[in-house]
Amino acid sequence: MSFSVVTAAQDAKKAARKVAKLGDSEKKAVLLEIAEQLMLQAPEIMTANAKDLYAGANNGLSDAMLDRLKLDNARLQKIADAVKEVAEQPDPVGNMSSVTRLASGIDVGKMRIPLGVIAMIYESRPNVTIDAAALCFKAGNAVVLRGGKEALHSNLALADCIHKALAKFAIPSAAVTVIPDPDRAIMNELLTLNQYIDLIIPRGGEGLIRFVSENSRIPVIQHYKGVCHLYVAAAADQAKALSILENGKTQRTGVCNALETLLVDAAIADIFLPKVAALFNQHDVTVHACAKSIEAFAGATAATEEDWHAKYLAMEIAVKVVDGFDDAVNHIEAYGSGHTDVIVTQDYSEAQRFVRSIDSSVVMVNASSRFSDGGELGLGAEIGISTSKLHAYGPMGAEQLTTEKFVVLGDGQVRA
């Protein structure tokens, strides 16, 4: 029997009404069961993931993409732990805020409510299947998940864990739907189903996000590429700067919060750049350098305009010497993607100026860009990092998957 995305969306809308009515204790129990099922079914998940990895390698996936695709026991445990953390967080649904008594005598407040049905379109990252399912469920939503063909076996194995947990508590499996067919035509049809789906969240390469944004009839929260900058100011602790640079660039290159551009203040360039060159030599980092920095790096190529926009997803980085704070900020404003930008400085006032000046969704002082992640920022997990400002900006957890409605409490008042 062929898969019908229309039927799946209709069923998700029905399921969303039931999920929205679940209490905190019920949602918590389901999420803890999902975490338990992940570990109980670890062998099956690893077998499915091995199929995806084998196919990906044979189809020429890059090392960075294969790293995103890979699941092992440690990563699976981390995914399960994230679900547990989401389960233990306060329930955002039903919270009242800003209750005010007006001159008319009515009390006006706002209550958090689920969005409804969320569709997630993403590429070869099977952890997103669980993160998105857990966060949407915690926020009282149903979710339709369309992963990439590279992770199909892994995603279906993970979906089985979710559905076993839902069945144990008599919750419709349509509360979390993993589309079992990677046919692009199904994704195209999904983008038209605005009568059933309330929000689309694409997560992946820039091409995918642009396609979804341009073709969807449903509101889209965008997660564009992370051209993350590190500005090493004249007042930086250079040892801290090197550590932050190493972690941000070399720990995992295939992630959106990896560093792509290093900006170094001209006042310390002569001293700091040789240290950077030695660090990059250790990790075989390819350097695209500006005219003022290229002599510090053996084998570097001259940076072009494209390099300042680049999301390398590799052991590769652009380097530029800047003439002070304003020049650094101007560069980030011109080439940043609104994702994550970092300053290293021991000057408190300069740090505060940077925080106020940079408009990115995450701005950091003396910390690695790799902390730009929902789990690391206390959200338990994330469904993505929004680089558009409506209605969320930055890492999105359960609360960002809700909206608010006005609640008015009266005692017979009528409008004059």
Image (cartoon, grey):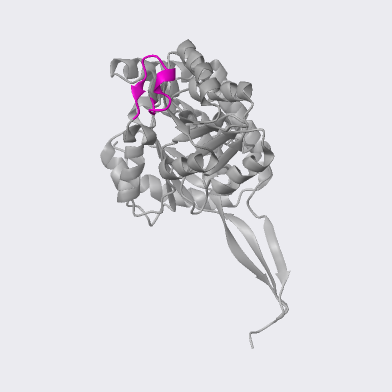
Q: Considering the image in quadrants, where does the N terminus appear?
A: top left
Q: Residue furthest top?
A: 282
Residue at image coords 65%, 55%: 94
Q: Is residue 282 above or below residue 96?
A: above
Residue projecting furthest to the bottom: 416
Q: Nearer the viewer, residue 105 or 274?
A: 274
Give 357 or 143, whichever is nearer the viewer. 357
* 32 with respect to 200 (left or right): right
Tell me residue 232's x, y (percent): 55, 30
Judged left or right of residue 332, residue 105 is right
In the picture shown, does residue 69 fall above or below 226? above
Name which quarter of the figure residue 179 lies in: top left
Q: Nearer the viewer, residue 238 or 59?
A: 238
Q: Main secondary structure of the magenta part?
A: loop
Give the x, y percent position of residue 73: 55, 16
The boundaries of the magenta stretch are 289-303
Q: Assign the C terminus to one quadrant of the image.
A: bottom right
Residue, x 54% and y 22% (percent of image)? 272
- Residue 201: name its quadrant: top left
User: Is residue 53 rendered to the left or right of residue 271?
Assistant: left
